[in-house]
Amino acid sequence: MTTVRTLSIALLATLCACAPAAFAQSGGAPPAAGPRKAQHEVAVKDAAFAVVPANDVAGAGAVGAGDVEALKARAGKETTLVGKVVSVFQPESRSIVLLNFARNYKDAATVGVKAEHFAAFPDLRGLEGKQVLVTGKVTLYRDRPQILIEKRAQVRVVKTP
């Protein structure tokens, strides 16, 4: 019985040691070791968001980030919203970064960037206090409008005079 147990433990140890390499070769990524990195740690360093003149905002047909009802009515549709980023929030899980457009996040839409897209953006904390145009599909999360973005081109900073 001891020999079977010893062989089982040895086999399990071998499988555990080889699994990350085999998983990586199969085109996947090994399971995350440790916590995720914060967005600013993986952010693009040599890129910036596009800047548009303030008079382009009206031409974009943007909906105000605080117009919750209008944005809810646009659920499922590609929409451009405009608003001043009041805060940038990343939970301890580091699974998402949220751009909030009101002190009470329930008073406006939210824009989110999931962890798998962090590296596509410059440091999102740099958007705090800036007016932005964000384009994407409006979805509802707990009956609140949100836009999840994946590409830097979906965000444009409005140049203030």
Image: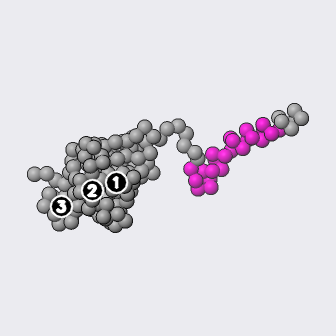
Residue 77, image quadrant: bottom left
List x then y, in percent, for residue 15.
72, 44
Where does the N terminus fall, quadrant-wise?
top right
- SS class of the residue under badge 1? strand
Residue 115 can be seen, yes or no? yes
| Residue furthest out toward the top | 2
Determine whether 130 is above or below 4 in the image.
below
Give the main secondary structure of the magenta stretch: helix
The residue type indicated by label 1 comes to Arg
Q: Mark 1 points at which residue?
A: 144
- SS class of the residue under badge 2? helix
Verify whether residue 154 appears in magenta: no
Residue 156, image quadrant: bottom left
Verify whether residue 23 appears in magenta: yes
Separation (CA) of disc 1 from disc 3: 23 Å
Q: Name the residue under label 3.
A: 57
Residue 156 can be seen, yes or no? no
Q: Measuring 16% from the left and 53% from the top, which residue is drawn there? A: 159
List x then y, in percent, for residue 80.
27, 62
Separation (CA) of disc 2 from disc 3: 18 Å
Q: Mark 1 near mark 2, Cβ–Cβ under 8 Å?
A: yes
Separation (CA) of disc 1 from disc 2: 8 Å
Query: How is the model colour-coded?
Result: one colour
The stretch of residues the image draws in magenta is: 7-29
